[in-house]
Structures are given as C-alpha cells and as structure tokens.
Image (tube, rainbow, N blue to C red):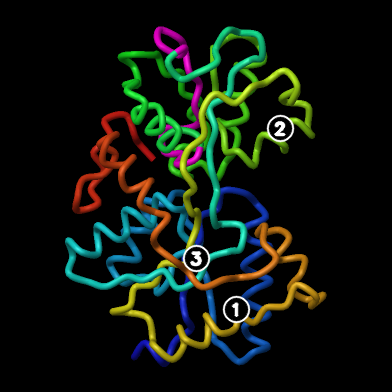
C-alpha cells in the first residue's frame, strides 16, 4: 500500500484523558473535509520520536524537547523532518525562578548554597531551561546550589504540570528556597491558590522560547496529504462551533506556521545538561521514561 492509499497517521502523547477527546474530534472534522486521518497514542515522547524516525507515523504532535530529539535523530538516520505548524500559544514563552518575598533572595547569586525546586527531569519549562538560565549566571546545579526535583509524569516532557505545581507548593511550605515554573503558570497557580502572587518574587527569567510543534517525517508522509493537513489546520476558525471546544481543550485560538529559531535555548540547555547526545540518544543518567 502506498502512502497515498492510507490515512495520514499522527502520533500524540496521552498526558491527559482529554487527548482522546481532542484527536477523536479532529479526526471526525478532518473526515468531513475529505482528509483521511487517524491517530495513535503514546505513553511517552521518546517512543513517539522513535516511531516517527522509523516511519511508523507520518507526523508527531511533539513537545519542544521531542522536537530537539527528533531533529538530531533524523540527521543521524539520514532522514528529513520539518515543523510546519504550531499553536499561537506555543510562541515566546519564558520560565521564571521564584522565591518567597522577604526571604533575602534578591538575585541569582543569593541562591548559592540554597535548595531550588524543579519539575520533572524532562520538563523543558520547569527544569532544563530555568536551570540553564542559572548556569548562565555562573551557578552550576548540584554544585553551587542543590536541586530538589519533583518527578511527576516522567516521559511526558512536563506536559503533566504536577511536578511543577509540587515545586511551587514546596516553596510556599518553606521546604525549598526557590522554585522553577513556566511564567504563564505564575498566574494560574495564583488563581488556584497554590501561590500567593504578593508573597512571591521573581529572581530570574529565561530568554523567550517556543513550545510544541507538529513534527513531520518528510520522507514518509504523503506530500499532498500533509499540505492539505496543514492547510486545514491553518484554516480552522475559532468562531466555528464544531472546532472551538477542541481548540479550547488543546489551548489555542489558532494554528500558526511553525518556526525554529526559538528552539535554540533548549538545544543549548540539552547540551549543557547532557540530556541527549548529538544523535538524539538519551544520555541523562537518571531519565527513565
């Protein structure tokens, strides 16, 4: 069977039960647009990337860390990948390092000898990127300060926000001196009562980075089907009652063309943390998805 004779196959990671609702809904909507489409779910991003590079799926709804690994593994395997689509909410994010107001921690240098809480080992936004921000100020994790990691949902690349939330709770409880979170979650955690915005100060902020993207194996996916897939995604209208609930669940108001420049901060953080090697092999000693 040629690629053009079968449905376009997407991989997505089941970090939450809503993922089934989202992609079941999109599959029905694509069928209405005469695009044969199906999806498979994975328990972790590493297996999804392996299957993308092996050509068992055409496109992967990838975390930023999964993109970094897919790009490196594709080069090593001699195949081509691209990232043609992302959400409007995937662009220009930052992470922050926070401390309790009145704790005496005013700058990153005040973190020397302290305990800094992070999310899961594979969370770009709550572990890899903010720790790399501190490296940039000359502070080496577990040497100049101690890291207390909250490994919730390992293998989900931080999509399960539980570890990040537990890090914030540990800060409030006085169990740690600082915590690393996505800047956008500062307000979320304040609304839900995990943090009191007035009781927290921001010690450091990362440079902007981009988050998820649709990663395509260009050597496997049918070119016409992929072009139609991207055209349909970019044409989704938030005012359409059929797709708006799905877009809300997925956390966007519109799909945008992908871009690659703002994955460089994560590429650098991955190298400094020795998380993957240049060929996309897992080299982090304590990472078992």
Residue drawn at point x = 46 percent, y = 43 percent: 207
Q: Nearer the viewer, residue 247 or 183?
A: 183
Q: CA distance from mark 3 to mark 2?
A: 32 Å
Q: Taking 272 as reference, is 145 above or below it?
A: above
Q: Residue 54: where, in percent of width, then height?
A: 28, 67
Residue at (54%, 86%) from the top-left corner?
36
**In this rendering, the label closer to the viewer, 3 or 2:** 2
Going from the N terminus, do you reach mark 1 or mark 3 first?
3
- Which residue corresponds to mark 1? 234
Specify start and end residues of the magenta stretch as a single range. 110-125
| Label pair 3/2, CB-CB below 8 angstroms | no
> In the rendered view, does 221 fall on the left or right side of 180?
left
Residue, disc 2: 189
Q: CA distance from mark 1 to mark 2?
A: 31 Å
Q: Is residue 256 magenta?
A: no
Q: Disc 1 to disc 3, how far (Cα)?
A: 22 Å
- Residue 163, image x, y percentages: 55, 30
């Amino acid at each position: 069977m040629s690629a053009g004779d079968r449905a376009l196959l997407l991989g997505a990671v089941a970090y939450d039960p809503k993922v089934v609702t989202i992609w079941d809904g999109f599959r029905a909507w694509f069928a209405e647009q005469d695009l044969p489409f199906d999806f498979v779910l994975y328990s972790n991003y590493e297996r999804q990337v392996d299957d993308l590079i092996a050509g068992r799926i055409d496109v992967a709804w990838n975390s930023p860390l999964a993109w970094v690994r897919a790009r490196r593994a594709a080069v090593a395997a001699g195949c081509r990948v691209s990232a043609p689509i992302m959400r409007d909410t995937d662009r220009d994010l930052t992470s922050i390092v926070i401390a309790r107001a009145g704790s005496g921690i005013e700058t990153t240098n005040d973190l020397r000898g302290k305990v800094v809480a992070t999310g899961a080992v594979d969370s770009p936004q709550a572990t890899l990127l903010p720790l790399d921000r501190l490296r940039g100020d000359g502070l080496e994790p577990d040497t100049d300060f101690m890291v207390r990691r909250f490994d919730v949902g390992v293998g989900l690349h931080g999509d399960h926000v539980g570890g990040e939330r537990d890090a914030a709770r540990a800060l409030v409880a006085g169990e740690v001196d600082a915590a690393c979170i996505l800047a956008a979650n500062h307000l979320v955690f304040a609304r839900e009562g995990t943090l009191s915005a007035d009781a927290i100060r921001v010690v450091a902020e990362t440079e902007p980075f981009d988050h998820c993207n649709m990663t395509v194996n260009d050597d496997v996916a049918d070119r016409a089907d992929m072009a139609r897939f991207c055209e349909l995604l970019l044409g989704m209208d938030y005012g359409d009652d059929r797709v708006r609930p799905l877009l809300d669940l997925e956390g966007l108001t519109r799909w945008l063309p992908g871009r690659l420049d703002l994955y460089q901060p994560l590429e650098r953080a991955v190298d400094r943390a020795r998380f993957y090697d240049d060929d996309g092999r897992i080299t982090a000693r304590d990472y078992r998805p």
